[in-house]
Image: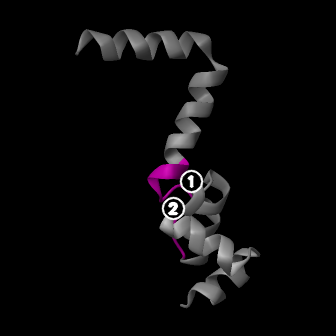
Amino acid sequence: MSLRALARQLEISDSHLSRVLRQTDYKRASPDLTSRVAVVFGLPADYFPEFREAFVIEKISSDPQLREQLYKRLTRRA
């Protein structure tokens, strides 16, 4: 599949997709974009690590207790 065809399916410009793929101008794939790309290729929406990372960060940010539990667990092993 060409970059243009993929961009068309994702309903974004091919130039934006190109910048994301090359990480030009500090462009990174958003969780939404990564899940949409995964679905286009028949993969689970959470296939790409960027999607899973954003999910984890959102959960930690919205739950102070979870954040503290995770921090304590991670610092004990350091």
Give the percent coordinates (x, y) of residue 40. Answer: 61, 76
Answer with left or right where residue 65 lies relative to residue 62: left
Q: Which mark is residue 75?
A: none
Main SS, magenta region, reads loop
Camera-side residue of 73 and 11:
11
Give the percent coordinates (x, y) of residue 64. Answer: 60, 12
The residue that disc 1 covers is: 26
The residue that disc 2 covers is: 23
Name of the residue lying farthest toward the left: 78
Secondary structure under the numbered disc 1 in the rendered image: helix
**Is residue 27 positioned above or below 8 on the image?**
above
Q: Which residues are magenta?
A: 42-51
Dot 2 amino acid type: Gln
Q: Is residue 49 magenta?
A: yes
**Image coloring type:** one colour
Q: Quadrant of residue 63?
A: top right
